[in-house]
Image (cartoon, rainbow, N blue to C red):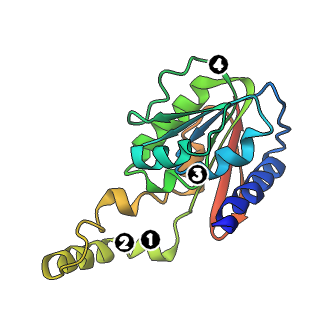
Amino acid sequence: MIEFWASGMSIWKDIRAKIAFQPKPTDSVVEIGCGVGRLSRAMSSEVGRIDAFDISQEMLDIAQQSGLPNVTFRLSQGDSLQPLQDSSADLVLAYCVFQHLPSLDVLHNYVGEMARVAKPGSICAFTLTPRTWHDNLQLLMKVKGRIRDLWSNGPKGLSADEWIGIRPTVEQVRALSSSPMQVVSMGNERLLFWFVR
């Protein structure tokens, strides 16, 4: 467990370096898909405030146990960052979340919400796993998964779109923002996309 929390610091350091973000104690950060708060913990000592969103109340309950005084953990309502105000964040970040989205339309909505809550001149950043040859076999894997669901006593529904997620091309992702989008590898087939509002 110590390694898991320590990895948050390593990930945060890597992201900061790749997007050239210099955190200040007055900064307001929005984290999408915070899970149990691994990155929230890493960022909290360097910024003034974090609004951390997740779709799982169970994950948020665990995250809140950290007792971080400058972090507000919020249950997500779809692809919205309500109740956050327009132009209120110095950084909007989503790490290892968007590849689980069911469609490019939902990703488009999130990118729009990220831009809405970011202050002018602020950075919006997120990771995605690009399409690989394996993804091209996805239809076959879905059929195999559904057949397994019929004949297995194990967990059902693992081949559903919300588990498989999206694997858009770099061009498809760049087309979602009116601002020029940068992209760099983070290793492990993960790409970091970011743009300045």
- Residue tagged by mark 2? 138
If you read the primary sequence from the N terminus, does the residue marked by circle 3 or circle 4 appear first? 4
- SS for dot 3: helix
- Residue tagged by mark 4? 87
Q: Residue 136's quadrant in the figure? A: bottom left
Residue under the image location 80 percent in, 53 percent down:
13
Disc 2 crowd rating (10 Å Cα; few below 14, some 14-19, many 20+) is: few
If you read the primary sequence from the N terminus, does the residue marked by circle 2 or circle 4 appear first? 4
In the rendered view, does 81 fall on the left or right side of 127?
left
- SS for dot 2: helix
- Asked if marks 3 and 4 touch (Cβ < 8 Å), the reply is no
- Labelled disc at residue 171: 3
> Disc 2 versus disc 4: distance between alpha carbons?
39 Å
Up-down relation of residue 114 to residue 105 (above or below): above
If you read the primary sequence from the N terminus, does the residue marked by circle 3 or circle 2 appear first? 2
Q: Quadrant of the C terminus?
A: top right
- Residue tagged by mark 1? 135
In the rendered view, does 193 fall on the left or right side of 154?
right
If you read the primary sequence from the N terminus, does the residue marked by circle 3 or circle 1 appear first? 1
Q: Amino acid at mark 3?
A: Glu
- SS for dot 4: loop
> Disc 3 versus disc 4: distance between alpha carbons?
27 Å
- SS for dot 1: helix
Disc 3 crowd rating (10 Å Cα; few below 14, some 14-19, many 20+) is: few
